[in-house]
């Protein structure tokens, strides 16, 4: 058996709408945008990850950039399969192998996923040489990654704001007691900024610029303790067609994102209202944990805290909480058997 163990490698994958992260040998070996650049004529992949991301919005008619995942699930089967395959091939220690080893994988999926979508993820993994494929729900992986003891008879609430979906779950005794998955997250925030720029400033900006605005001056609250400086944004003037530049402040971005944040707040409140009373008492004492890239939005923790009147804690490395949890499950598969999706 020991010889065959040498032929099997273990990888934990957080297949996200915005970024894909892979853990191998307890290290994050891949952390790349989930994006693929294709040659339209041949259908061949030209670039994946960071390289393809730089091409986004700057391609000519023979090249198109595709984001294979939408709302946390696979939207383009072929592109996602090729993307996963290329990411796995780029793992430094697997590059040196003469042959592709068979893989034992743990992959995280949104909690609101359907059977069909689940099968798509599983089949994609099997086609890239996955011999044993396990699936785990994102909020569960996030909770483990944050360091919450999910085995205890104690309620914990996790809000994981990713690129495509926001996953809200109350976890106790290794299971999800009540959960809600809303398709409002980082991507919707980016589109809100594009729409705001068009309607308020007659400025047409691309996705990458909007993403940069979100990271640099994005805010969920008008009152920040240390507000960011105003940012200059370049794009195309919709009236004259000429390139132009404007200055934008965090307060404007707060206005742009307000509707979406209200919907996340409402979903958190709805999940709290469905929580059994004993678990609600636990959450009152332990507060709510935030994970995912969206939780880094300035002032979001304060705003959720005002709405729920509960303490809010942001994971120390929110972008990697989910993949870290997936990696922990991969290392102790027997212990966490009960949390894996059957």
Image: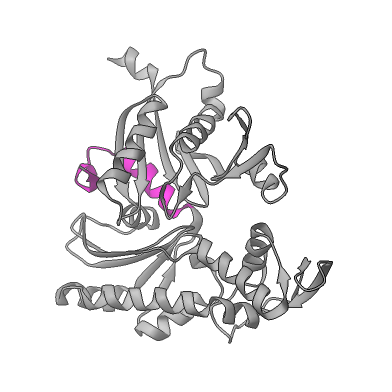
Determine whether 273 is above or below 19 in the image: below
**Residue 126: which quarter of the image?**
top left
Q: Is residue 160 magenta?
A: no
Q: Residue at x 48, y 61 (%)?
A: 316
Q: Residue at x 53, y 66 (%)?
A: 296
Q: Quadrant of the N terminus?
A: top left
Q: Quadrant of the C terminus?
A: top left
| Magenta segment | 320-341
Q: Is residue 146 visible?
A: yes
Q: Position of residue 295 (x, y in %)?
A: 48, 67
Determine whether 124 is above or below 309 in the image: above
Of 195 and 123, nearer the camera is: 195
Of 214 and 21, nearer the camera is: 214
Q: Is residue 293 left or right of residue 249?
A: left
Q: How many marks?
A: 0
Q: Is residue 251 left or right of residue 27?
A: right
Give the image's coloring scheme: one colour
Q: Position of residue 146 (x, y in %)?
A: 39, 58
The majority secondary structure of the magenta stretch comes to helix
Q: Is residue 317 visible?
A: no
Q: Residue at x 63, y 83 (%)?
A: 251
Of 174 and 263, nearer the camera is: 263
**Residue 177: which quarter of the image?**
bottom left
Q: Position of residue 268 (x, y in %)?
A: 34, 74
Q: Position of residue 303 (x, y in %)?
A: 46, 81
Determine whether 5 is above or below 191 in the image: above
Q: Is residue 334 magenta?
A: yes
Q: Is residue 50 left or right of residue 79?
A: right
Determine whether 159 is above or below 47 in the image: below
**Residue 276: which quarter of the image?**
bottom left
């Amino acid at each position: 058996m020991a010889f065959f163990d040498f032929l099997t490698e273990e990888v934990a994958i957080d297949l996200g709408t915005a970024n894909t992260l892979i853990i191998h040998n307890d290290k994050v070996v891949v952390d790349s945008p989930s994006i693929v650049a294709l040659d339209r004529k041949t259908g061949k992949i030209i670039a994946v990850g960071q390289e393809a991301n730089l091409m986004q919005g700057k391609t000519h008619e023979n090249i198109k950039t595709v984001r294979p995942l939408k709302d946390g699930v696979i939207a383009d089967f072929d592109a996602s399969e090729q993307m996963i395959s290329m990411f796995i091939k780029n793992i430094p220690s697997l590059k040196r192998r003469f042959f592709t080893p068979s893989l034992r994988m743990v992959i995280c999926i949104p909690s609101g996923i359907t059977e069909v979508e689940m099968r798509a993820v599983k089949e994609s993994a099997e086609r890239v040489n996955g011999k044993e494929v396990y699936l785990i729900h994102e909020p569960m992986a996030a909770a483990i990654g944050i360091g919450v003891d999910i085995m205890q008879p104690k309620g914990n609430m996790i809000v994981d704001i990713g690129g495509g979906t926001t996953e809200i779950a109350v976890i106790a005794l290794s299971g999800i007691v009540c959960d809600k998955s809303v398709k409002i997250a980082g991507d919707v925030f980016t589109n809100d900024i594009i729409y705001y720029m068009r309607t308020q400033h007659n400025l047409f900006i691309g996705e990458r610029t909007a993403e940069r605005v979100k990271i640099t001056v994005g805010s969920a609250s008008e009152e920040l303790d240390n507000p960011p400086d105003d940012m200059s944004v370049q794009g195309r003037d919709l009236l004259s067609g000429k390139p132009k530049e404007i200055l934008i402040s965090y307060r404007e971005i707060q206005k742009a994102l307000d509707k979406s944040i209200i919907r996340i707040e409402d979903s958190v409140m709805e999940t709290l209202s469905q929580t059994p009373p004993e678990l609600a008492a636990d959450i009152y004492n332990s507060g709510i944990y935030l994970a995912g890239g969206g939780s880094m939005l300035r002032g979001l923790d304060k705003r959720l805290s005002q709405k729920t009147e509960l303490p809010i804690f942001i994971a120390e490395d929110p972008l990697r909480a989910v993949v870290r949890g997936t990696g922990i499950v991969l290392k102790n598969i027997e212990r966490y058997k009960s949390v894996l999706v059957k």
